[in-house]
Every structure is written in C-alpha cells, then in structure tokens.
C-alpha cells in the first residue's frame, strides 16, 4: 500500500513538472488572491505560486500555472485591477509555471524568461527521474524576450528586477525582486514545507539551490515577504531554516558518498529523519529525494 501511495504522489509530481493535467482536473480549482504588499499579490491554484504586480501602467505576472486555468487566473487579476497583463515572466520551464503562456500571449501579453527556458521549451525534454518525456511547446508558448544574467522592468511605481540563478532547481531559474515593495518571488529554488525537486535532468543541482537561497537571503531583511515556488508566503527567518536543512543534508550526503556508502545504505542511515516530519510530506518522499540528490552528486551531466 505504501508503494502504491508513493507512486501516486510521484505521478502527481510528474504532472506538476510537465504540465500534463487535463482541463477536467482543473474544473474545481479556485484561484486564491493574497495581498503581499501594496500592489503586489500571490495567486494560488494548482501548480507554482503566481506573483502579480499591479500598477496604473499595467499588470505583471510571475508564472502562469496551467493553460486550463488562464481564464480563472485572469479573473483573479481583474478582482484587483482593470489593467491588462503586459508581461509574464517564467521563473523556469516547467509546465506548472509556463502552461498559460500561449493563452496569455494570444491576448497580447509579452512572455519573458531566461535564455535556457526558451531553449528547453523549444525541444523535447526527458525526465529520467519521473520516466517521462515532455514534448516541445507550441511556438506561441515560447518566451519572445529572453535574457542571460539579469533584466529590469519599470511599471508605474514598481521596479521589477529579475536575475538568473545558475544550475539550481533547473539551469534556467530566475528570481524576481521588487526592492521598493520589499518582495521576492523565489520560483522553485524554494519549496517551503516539502523537500524541493532538484531537476537534475534539466541541469539542476543541490549546490545551485543552496547558492541560490543564499543569494536570496542577501537581498532580504526581517520585513521581506518571500513568495516560494510552492508553499505559503514566508519571511527571511523561515528561508534561513530551509537553507539550514539543505546544508545539513548536503553535508551528510557528501560525507556518506565519500565514505563509500551505497544509495541504499544512505537511505537506511536516516540522514533526513530529523527533517522528515516538516519537509517529507510533499510529492517526493525522503528516500526518493535522497535518490535524486545522490544521482545529482555522483553523475556528470
């Protein structure tokens, strides 16, 4: 029974990563709207958390979940502003963050992302971890503006800065920083309350996730609101707790590999056991998470 539950959880995680969820499965999804700061909101539904920045010059979305949810997402936007969505910035290529691109682009929204997001969306992607292939996205879903290191937007009173975090959750992750509002959208570099999916098949690494979290922490103060890719709104103290967990697991895993322990021995050693209650209830259970991290630490990609 446990194996069956684990398989279901992993399959659900695969759907989140690939965007392969049907319109029927979205019928009962409600889009929540949470005020983060003046003119800044977090939208929740199915998939990655969406950031919404509102000004008199237009609206700006950070990620857009799945295509069947676009109308609901736009209705949520209209609940706080009558301005059109001028831009959507994808924090990485996964379908629960880019699935609405084509629908929004058809309505005149400009899609922006890191160079590697367009590259990965333009070709078939294979996930060895999930045993699944994701086909190339339609041309209309691809970002039409891409950047390498950083990009800035000026929308009304908001300065919106985005910068690349290399080889973190994927090889195309971007964080979005609103300095005046003191808000950061961390994308999937931060999964709060569950072990993070490190997409090794897409160039991700635990080292990169840890480095990315450290860079986010440098930008934050005690009053900063941080929107994670998955999980509730958090502050800097909670971010540092997440970072501490990652660092400890990283060090223990490295020590175990250096001692010549096999994956099975590492899993049996319980190196995550003290964290499993808080972090182990997500779509990747502890043993599978260790399998993923072990692969990332021992294979060259």
Image: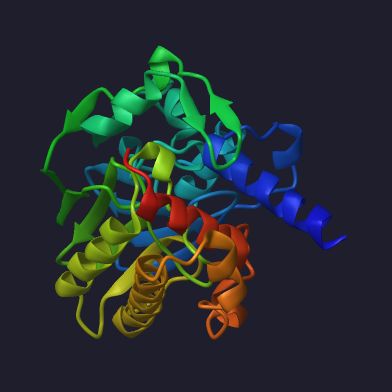
- Quadrant location of the C terminus in the rendered image: top left
Q: Position of residue 29 (x, y in %)?
A: 68, 49
* Above or below, comparing residue 154 to residue 211 in the picture: above
Q: In which quarter of the view is residue 93 placed?
A: top left
User: Outermost residue, top direction?
Assistant: 139
Tell me if 138 is positioned left or right of 18 in this view. Answer: left
Q: Quadrant of the N terminus?
A: bottom right
- Specify whether residue 182 is in view: no
Q: Is residue 151 left or right of residue 198?
A: left
Location of residue 113 (image quadrant): top left
Residue drawn at x 76%, y 50% as measured from the top left: 8
Taking the view exactly as shown, the residue that stands out farthest to the front is 260
Colour scheme used in the picture? Answer: rainbow
Query: Is 24 in front, or is 114?
Result: 114
Q: Is residue 175 above or below residue 250?
A: above
Q: Residue at x 20, y 60 (%)?
A: 178
Q: Is residue 201 above or below residue 160?
A: above
Q: Nearer the viewer, residue 258 or 21?
A: 258
How far across and down, in percent of the image, does residue 37 sit? 32, 69
Q: Is residue 172 visible?
A: yes
At 53% from the left and 36% from the top, the residue drawn is 128
Q: Position of residue 275 (x, y in %)?
A: 53, 81
Q: Vertical placement of 266 versus 95: above or below?
A: below
Residue 60 is left or right of residue 245, and the answer is left
Q: How many marks?
A: 0
Toward the viewer: 270 or 50? Answer: 270
Residue at the spot x=69%, y=44% of the render?
11
Q: Left or right of 255: which side holds 131?
A: right
């Amino acid at each position: 029974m446990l194996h069956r539950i684990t398989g279901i959880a992993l399959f659900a995680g695969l759907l989140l990563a690939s965007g392969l969820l049907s319109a029927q499965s979205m019928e009962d999804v409600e889009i929540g709207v949470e005020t983060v700061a003046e003119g800044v909101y977090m939208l929740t539904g199915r998939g990655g958390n969406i950031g919404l920045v509102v000004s008199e010059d237009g609206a700006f979305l950070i990620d857009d979940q799945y295509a069947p949810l676009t109308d609901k997402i736009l209705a949520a936007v209209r609940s706080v502003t009558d301005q059109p969505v001028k831009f959507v910035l994808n924090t990485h290529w996964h379908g629960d963050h880019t699935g609405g691109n084509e629908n929004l682009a058809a309505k005149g929204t400009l899609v922006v992302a890191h160079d590697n997001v367009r590259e990965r969306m333009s070709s078939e992607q294979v996930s060895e971890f999930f045993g699944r292939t994701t086909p190339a996205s339609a041309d209309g879903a691809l970002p039409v503006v891409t950047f390498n290191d950083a990009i800035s937007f000026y929308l009304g009173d908001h300065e919106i800065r985005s910068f690349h975090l290399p080889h973190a959750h994927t090889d195309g992750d971007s964080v979005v920083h609103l300095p005046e509002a003191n808000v950061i959208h961390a994308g999937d570099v931060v999964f709060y309350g569950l072990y993070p999916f490190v997409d090794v098949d897409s160039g991700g690494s635990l080292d990169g996730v840890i480095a990315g979290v450290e860079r986010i922490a440098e930008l934050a103060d005690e009053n900063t609101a941080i929107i994670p890719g998955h999980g509730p709104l958090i502050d800097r103290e909670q971010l540092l707790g997440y970072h501490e967990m990652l660092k400890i697991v990283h060090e223990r895993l490295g020590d175990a590999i250096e001692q010549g322990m096999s994956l099975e021995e590492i899993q049996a050693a319980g190196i995550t056991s003290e964290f499993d209650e808080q972090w182990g209830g997500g779509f990747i259970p502890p043993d599978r998470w260790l399998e993923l991290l072990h692969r990332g630490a021992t294979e060259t990609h």
